[in-house]
Amino acid sequence: MSSSRSSHAPQPREQLAAQLAESVASALAVDLTNQERALLVVSGGSTPVPFFTRLAAVDLPWERVDVTLADERWVNGEHPDSNARLVRQHLLQGLAAAARFHPLTTAHGTPEEGAAEVAERLAGLSWPASAVILGMGGDGHTASLFPDSGELGLALSTDEATVAVRASSVPQPRITLSAGWLHKARRHMLHIVGDDKRAVLARAMGGDDVRELPIRAFLSCPLAVYWAP
């Protein structure tokens, strides 16, 4: 009997997703008591999928919530690598289907051509965001702030909302919110899983060279770390 019960016990990553969803939902609910609309900035990849699923089931006035991304690959919205596709499939479902989604791509052929239009789109949202949910790669990148990108310095310093990014470590060109705009949030949360990511974060906390590990750009602000093995 004990083994049967244990097989149904929540796994650490499931618990993590539930806790993060509860925190984000609470943040949105609090802010919506004081303002007409609230903004949530999320990240792509496989890690946030369980979190998206949990959050989508929370009863909130979703019709007053705007959702956008921290970064995006410059691909069609139906492309398998599209973060927008991921958000539509896993977050904008059920109750959360009433939220208003603002993608980071345009019909332009390159992110360099489309960045200004996306920035204008973002400028109309309810900043500061209620929450920015960041992820982190094994190279210490967050959003599309890559250590090997020629645009990293610009993305870390500009007052503009968006930056077109190319890096040898990734196959597609990307668009990212600049560090300055990612900082425009009441709450920052880092969602990571696995011992390797924990080790990278520990290394980041032990130094201050942002260009080596760009996640360091967010260690100087209050950052809630959500981690599970």
Image: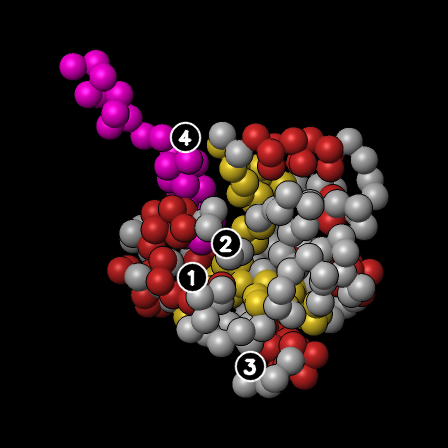
- Residue sitting nearer the eye, 74 or 106: 74
Image location of residue 199, percent across then percent down: 65, 31
Task: Give the amino acid at mark 1.
Answer: Leu
Query: How busy is the neighbourhood of tag 1: few (under 14 within 10 Å), some, or many (20 plus)?
Result: many
Tell me if residue 24 is in the magenta stretch.
Answer: yes
Residue hosting label 1: 86
Dot 2 or dot 3, earlier in sequence: 2
- Quarter of the image where the N terminus is located: top left
Q: CA distance from mark 4 to mark 1?
A: 22 Å
Q: CA distance from mark 2 to mark 3?
A: 20 Å
Mark identifier at residue 204: none
The residue lying at 80 percent from left, 64 percent from top is 150
The residue lying at 65 percent from left, 77 percent from top is 111
- Residue sitting nearer the eye, 21 or 35: 21
Residue hosting label 4: 12
Image location of residue 141, percent across then percent down: 68, 50
Residue bounds of the magenta highlight: 1-28
Image location of residue 73, percent across then percent down: 57, 67
The residue lying at 67 percent from left, 36 percent from top is 200
Res 38 seen here: yes
Dot 1 or dot 2, earlier in sequence: 2
Question: In the picture, residue 139 is in which quadrant?
Answer: top right
Question: In the picture, residue 105 is in which quadrant?
Answer: bottom right
* SS at badge 1: helix
- Asked if the residue under mark 4 is in contact with the one under mark 3, i.e. CB atoms within 8 Å, the reply is no
Query: How busy is the neighbourhood of tag 4: few (under 14 within 10 Å), some, or many (20 plus)?
Result: few
Residue hosting label 3: 106
